[in-house]
Image (cartoon, rainbow, N blue to C red):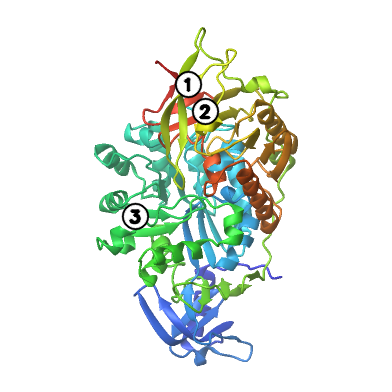
């Protein structure tokens, strides 16, 4: 398999000019295709594309003047030639894969550019972890740009991370070759309140001429939202309704509409374009979080584009939102996002613009996938041993660590309960009256209330915070544990049995991280994620198969939520309302403060 070396425009300009003028032969000519021009929103039949040095040299009705004796010819046969697809906001770690294996998974789906925020590994390994992700990303045959994480911890004072990201770290990273901007600014209360650290991070990014990513997870679209936009974030992917999308673009942001494994926020927002008629060039499609099973079985950005079209979006508009709009937003319109002279030769051949079957993927002028099979290498970084040993429990846990003690003398308590919302990131702050048994407060699976625990895993303190969660539908004796626990990535354990919860937590300590499901005292599924407790460097298909078994095991325990694993992994995300859990306690995210587990009756 071939490894693709990338030339800059400056290194290629003289040859591109010569090829376009017919003075030198192209490396590759794609002949007889339908040119989907996202610059003008046109479909142009019977066109050719000439490629040299991994870049487009000529796009027009006849490229015969670019053909030499050694020029490779690809007969498009009337297929559509669309730009390689771009994911405007995503986290590689959410795929449970390293950048190399993530690339291997998505290339056959037509993704050739990704704008990634590795803030998951930043919470575990700090700036060094970000650099390792960045370095492996630059080794790949497609374009993986890195946004320097902005918020580790995501909400200072409400959680404890393995490492913290500072404004000096951000300033240093802005000089790295693959850094495209600042990752999502999740600490929106900090921005609104003028926090000097947050403003310094955004200033360092803007001083470097790069883009600040946004994350405004609040329904308040009044002065607080205006203050957030004034602070610098240029895009936002946390919108869940049409009003959110409209507010963002009216204030000069790009509205990023996401379809991930569990986030279905395109359909509810795309009406801003399809019904309200707003300018679609200010909208971008993205995935945010996709686990490996979704990538292997359902697709990546091709899945998002198909979904947008199914929601009533014009196919050409949907393609713009997954190509040129994204490139323009990050200042790369002259580099990628369209089939135009001088740009990186990232092109996909498809026979239908609505269903988007991916027949051939070309990245930087080289065929990287044909009909679902990858044809290039995706090189791996040499991950060090200490990046594979990050689960530090401090002790062997037992069932008693998961006991919830009732207030003295109480026979009944009113408890705060985290309410899971299917297919959405926000949770609900619920209340439930629970009976006390022998001084302890158990869950009530009959009412879909089970226990949740956050186990500290960065410093080996042995700390366990216990609370309640509803929405998974678990029955019988079971437990599920994961070291993927956005954003601080401690360990989250959800279960109905204290014994199984302890067994699950200890198992992840033993294997170095991942996801495990236990039922009736035995393990019924395990996904090993030894790198930072977040990723595997095994092939995507193998990780996806393990993830499929994990999802089946959750169903076997009574859970029928769509992609419930993603919901599980976000239960500690203390920057999205309404109620979450952290190593410091239960967090009321509507007030950004620690709250008591029990309410006054």
In the structure shown, which secondary structural element does the residue marked by tag 2 occupy? strand
Give yes or no for contact between labels 1 and 2 (Cβ–Cβ under 8 Å).
yes
Question: Is 276 left or right of 132, judged from the image as shown?
Answer: left
Closest to the observer: 552 or 211?
552
Residue 287 at x, y percent in the picture = 48, 55
- Which quadrant would the C terminus be assigned to in this image? top left
Give yes or no for contact between labels 1 and 3 (Cβ–Cβ under 8 Å).
no
Give yes or no for contact between labels 2 and 3 (Cβ–Cβ under 8 Å).
no
* Image mark for residue 255: none
In the structure shown, which secondary structural element does the residue marked by tag 3 occupy? loop
Question: Is 450 left or right of 400, judged from the image as shown?
Answer: left
CA gap between label 1 and label 3 equals: 35 Å
Residue carrying label 2: 468
Question: Based on the displayed image, in which of its 4 quarters is residue 308 positioned?
Answer: bottom left
Question: Is 221 left or right of 266, judged from the image as shown?
Answer: left
Would you place residue 2 above or below residue 450 in this image?
Answer: below
In the structure shown, which secondary structural element does the residue marked by tag 1 occupy? loop
> What crowding class fits label 1: few (fewer than 14 Cα within 10 Å), some (14-19), or many (20 or more)?
some
């Amino acid at each position: 398999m071939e490894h693709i070396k990338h030339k800059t425009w400056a290194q290629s300009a003289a040859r591109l000019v010569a090829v376009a003028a017919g003075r030198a032969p192209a490396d590759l000519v794609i002949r007889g295709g339908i040119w989907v021009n996202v610059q003008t929103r046109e479909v142009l039949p019977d066109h050719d594309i000439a490629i040299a040095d991994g870049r487009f040299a000529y796009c027009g009705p006849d490229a015969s003047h670019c053909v030499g004796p050694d020029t490779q010819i690809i007969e498009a046969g009337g297929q559509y030639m669309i730009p390689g697809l771009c994911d405007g906001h995503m986290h590689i770690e959410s795929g449970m894969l390293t950048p190399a294996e993530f690339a291997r998974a998505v290339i056959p789906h037509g993704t050739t550019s990704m704008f990634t925020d590795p803030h998951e590994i930043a919470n575990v390994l700090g700036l060094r972890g970000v650099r390792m992700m960045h370095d492996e990303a630059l080794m790949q045959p497609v374009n993986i740009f890195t946004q320097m994480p902005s918020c580790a911890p995501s909400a200072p004072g409400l959680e404890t991370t393995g490492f913290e990201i500072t404004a000096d770290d951000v300033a240093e990273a802005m000089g790295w070759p693959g850094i495209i901007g600042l990752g999502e600014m999740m600490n929106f209360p900090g921005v609104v309140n003028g926090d000097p650290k947050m403003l310094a991070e955004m200033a360092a990014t803007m001083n470097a001429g790069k883009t600040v990513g946004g994350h405004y997870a609040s329904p308040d679209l009044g002065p607080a939202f205006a203050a957030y936009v004034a602070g610098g974030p240029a895009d936002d992917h946390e919108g869940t309704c049409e009003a959110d999308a409209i507010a963002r673009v009216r204030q000069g942001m790009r509205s990023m509409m996401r379809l991930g494994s569990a986030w279905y926020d395109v359909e509810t927002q795309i009406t801003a374009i399809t019904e309200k008629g707003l300018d679609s060039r200010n909208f971008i499609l993205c995935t945010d979080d996709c686990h490996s099973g979704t990538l292997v079985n359902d697709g990546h950005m091709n899945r998002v584009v198909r979904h947008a079209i199914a929601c009533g979006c014009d196919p050409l508009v949907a393609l713009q939102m997954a190509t040129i709009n994204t490139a323009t937003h990050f200042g790369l319109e002259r580099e990628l996002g369209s089939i135009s002279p001088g740009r990186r030769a990232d092109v996909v051949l498809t026979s239908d613009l609505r269903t988007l079957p991916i027949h051939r993927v070309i990245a930087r002028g080289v065929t990287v996938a044909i009909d679902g099979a990858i044809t290039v290498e995706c090189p791996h970084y040499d991950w060090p041993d200490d990046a594979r040993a990050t689960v530090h429990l401090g002790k062997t846990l037992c069932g008693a660590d998961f006991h919830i003690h009732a207030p003295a003398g109480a026979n009944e308590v009113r408890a705060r309960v985290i309410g899971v919302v299917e297919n959405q990131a926000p949770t609900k702050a619920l209340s439930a009256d629970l009976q006390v048994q022998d001084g302890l407060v158990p869950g009530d699976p009959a009412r879909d209330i089970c226990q949740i625990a956050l186990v500290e895993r960065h410093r080996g303190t042995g700390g366990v915070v216990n609370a309640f969660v509803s929405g998974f539908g678990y029955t019988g004796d079971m437990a599920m544990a994961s070291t993927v626990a956005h954003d601080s990535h401690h360990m989250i354990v959800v279960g109905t049995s204290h014994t199984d919860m302890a067994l699950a937590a200890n198992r992840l300590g033993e294997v170095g991280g991942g996801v495990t499901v236990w039922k009736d005292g035995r393990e019924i599924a395990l996904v090993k994620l030894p790198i930072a407790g977040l990723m595997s460097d095994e092939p995507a298909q193998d990780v996806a198969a393990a993830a499929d078994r994990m999802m089946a095991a959750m169903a076997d325990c009574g859970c029928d939520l769509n992609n419930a694993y993603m919901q599980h992994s976000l239960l500690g995300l203390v920057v999205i309302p309404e109620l979450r859990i952290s190593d410091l306690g239960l967090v009321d995210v509507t007030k950004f403060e620690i709250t008591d587990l029990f309410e006054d009756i």
